[in-house]
Image: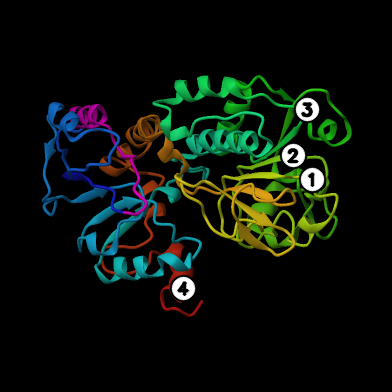
Amino acid sequence: MKIAIIREGKVPVDHRVALLPEQCQALQAQYPQLSFKVEPSKVRCIPDEAYQSAGIELSSDISDCDIFFGVKEVPIDQLIPNKTYFFFSHTIKAQAYNRGLLRNILDKKIRLIDYECLTNAKKQRIVAFGRFAGIVGTYNGIKTYGERSQRFQLKPAHECPDYEALKAELQKANFPAIKIAVTGTGRVGKGAVEILEALNLRKVSPEDYLHTNYSEPVYTVLGSGKYYKAKDGQVWSLKEFYQNPEHFTADFLKYTQVSDLLITAHYWHPQAEPLFSKSDMRTSDFQIKVIADITCDVEGSIPSTLRVSTIDKPVYDYNPQTEAIEEAYSQAQNISVMAVDNLPCELPYDASKSFGEQLSDQVFPALLGDDPTHIIRRASITDSQGNLMPNFNYLRSFVEGKS
């Protein structure tokens, strides 16, 4: 079996890679039937020569490969028919901007396996860049707060050579007695907390956060049960919330009245209510001035996320009165939004190393050996015959343009 490590073609460019050279070497040693071919890239965080030095073939012609590993969506004109692809497709929520991509995958009889859908028997994700999304997103949120308040300046995350350098840069931060709310307790949330711990900020309970005044900066971490409640007044049930989010209503406004910086690290289901409304953001008791929206669902859980931002220009202002985007830090009444959607790309080597370890440990045994819990099948959006897999038949009307 021959596997291709493809060149990232999406714009803006992404510097990450699914597997590092030494990881390819280790997999070939573990699975003698396996070989790799790497498509040359001028933007990848690992130079082509590093793969060659590791004995991995480098070639612009990857048409003889069986399975293709990328990171972001593959441009339609670069898709090779009748192959198997692994990448983040951003189609499972029926994202309109990728309708054409999914249609072409079906037309070209490509088997698409989406990293986001790779789960264990407990339906927990087994590969993700979430930790580094949380790390970089929170760093960017801190940087945004410093710039908006004119209290401190941090260099952009992508100018830090690695994670250790990024943590060292954080020591320039100088906070007043602010309150920071973090939503989400998964990989992204844990990454966010890593940064707040590196800053030696005090963590407090949600209850104390709401009702206690502090003389130092503090943060709290909120699970979904702290900011959603059942519409029928029943006791909170996480299982029910995941299965039927439409049965719950947002209960987040109390946090908007005491928070200065909001870091959103939760997963949002399209059927769930936004955390607050645009009209809520116009009230005098809405105190949040900086939102680091790591979730980055456009007009999703955070109404002020009207578009994604970029690594080169990560912040824009949202004007609550006009409900429009304005230049960053342009008016005191505005809310500054950081909504970069490819955050791990700012620490590409560290993120790629972690991701490759997850693939090697969790996915390759199922891909090349026994897969008793059907890890690969569950993550397959399409098959090699041009059909949606049964778990993803709900996308049929989306593909046909009916929804």
Occupied quadrant, residue 393: bottom left
Does the magenta-highlighted stretch encompass residue 93?
Answer: no
Say which element carries label 3: loop
Residue 2 figure quarter: top left
Tell me the magenta residue range: 10-30
- Badge 1 vs badge 2, beta-carbon distance below 8 Å: yes
The residue where tag 1 is placed is 287
Label 1 or label 3, whichever comes before in sequence order: 3
Q: Which residue is mark 4?
A: 398
Q: CA distance from mark 2 to mark 3?
A: 10 Å
Q: Secondary structure at mark 1?
A: loop
Amino acid carrying label 3: it is Ala
Residue 260, labelled with which disc?
2
Residue 219 coordinates in the image, percent (x, y)? 72, 30
Q: Earlier in the sequence, mark 2 or mark 3?
A: 3
- Residue 389, can we see it? yes
